[in-house]
Amino acid sequence: MEKKIQTILDDLIMRHPELGTVKNNIAEAYEIIRSSYEKGGKLLVAGNGGSAADSEHIVGELMKGFVKKRPVPEDFRKALMAVNETEGEKLAEHLQGALPAVSLTCHEGLSTAYSNDVDGEYTFAQQLYGFGRPGDVFLAISTSGGSRNILAAAVVAKAMGIRVVGLSGKTGGKLKDLSDCAIVVPSSETFLIQELHLPVYHALCLMLEETFFPV
C-alpha cells in the first residue's frame, strides 16, 4: 500500500482507536474497490434508513471532488472547447473527476413501482440486477447484517460476479457470510454503529481519491 494511502488509514485509527480491530478489513475493502475502478467497474451502494442516507453520502463523495478539486484532463478540456468554445471553457472549469458510483436508494419511481407490482423486499436486488455488471462492487450497508433486502441484493451480486463489501456492526449477521470483505465495526447499538460507519467510508473515499486523483 502506498505511503499516502497508509497514512490516511493510520490517521483514521488514531482518531478512532476502536476501529483498529477492522483496520485490515478496511484496507482490503479499499483494494477491492480500487481494483474494480482500475478495470472500468463501478460501485453500487445500498442501505436502509440512516444507512440509506450513508449510501447517498458515499456517492456524493465519489462522484465529485471530496477534498480535492479533481480538474478534468487537458485533452477533455480541448474536446469540450472544440464542441463549443465558450460553453466548453465554462464546463472545463466546473466539471470534476468522478469515480462511478450509484446509490440504489434514490430511484423512487422504480422502487415504488417494483414494490407495488412485485415485492418491495427485492427492490435493491432488482436494481442491482439491472445496473450491475461483472467486476463491479456492491457496498452493502446494514447495521445488523440481517436486512433482508440487503441480503437479497448480496445474493444477486454474488451470482453476477460482483464482489460484496459488507459494512455492518453487532456480529455482522448473515451479511458477513455473503461478503467478500466484511467490515464489522465494534458496536451493538444501531446509532453507535452508524457513527463508526461514517469515518470508515470517509477514509475509503479519501484513499480512493488519493489513488485516482493524486494531483
Image: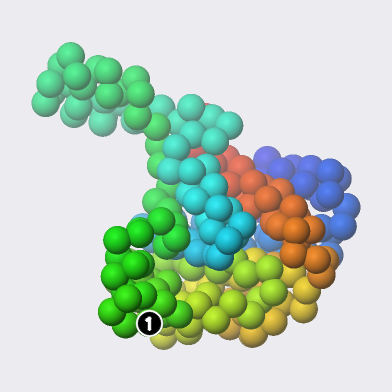
Decide if residue 157 is on the left or right side of residue 192: left
Task: Let me know if residue 85 appears in the view.
Answer: yes
Nearest to the observer: residue 177 or residue 40:
177
Left or right of residue 119: residue 165: right
Residue 212 in the figure: left or right of residue 92: right
Residue at left 18%, top 29%?
79
Q: Is residue 32 visible?
A: no
| Element at label 1 | helix
For badge 1, the amino acid type reads Asp
The residue where tag 1 is placed is: 119
Instruction: Decide: is 70 above or below 180.
Output: above
Q: Nearer the viewer, residue 16 or 170?
A: 170
What residue sits 71% from the left and 57% below the top?
A: 194
Q: Which quadrant of the figure has residue 146?
A: bottom right
Query: Residue 191's spot in the image, x, y percent?
Result: 75, 58
Whether 14 is drawn above or below 83: the answer is below
Find the residue positioned furthest to the left: 83
Residue 170 left/right relative to 201: right
Residue 125 placement (x, y as % from top left): 41, 77
Q: Is residue 34 above or below residue 81?
A: below
Pinpoint residue 172: horizontal percent, then vertical percent. 71, 77
Q: Position of residue 54 (x, y in %)?
A: 58, 53
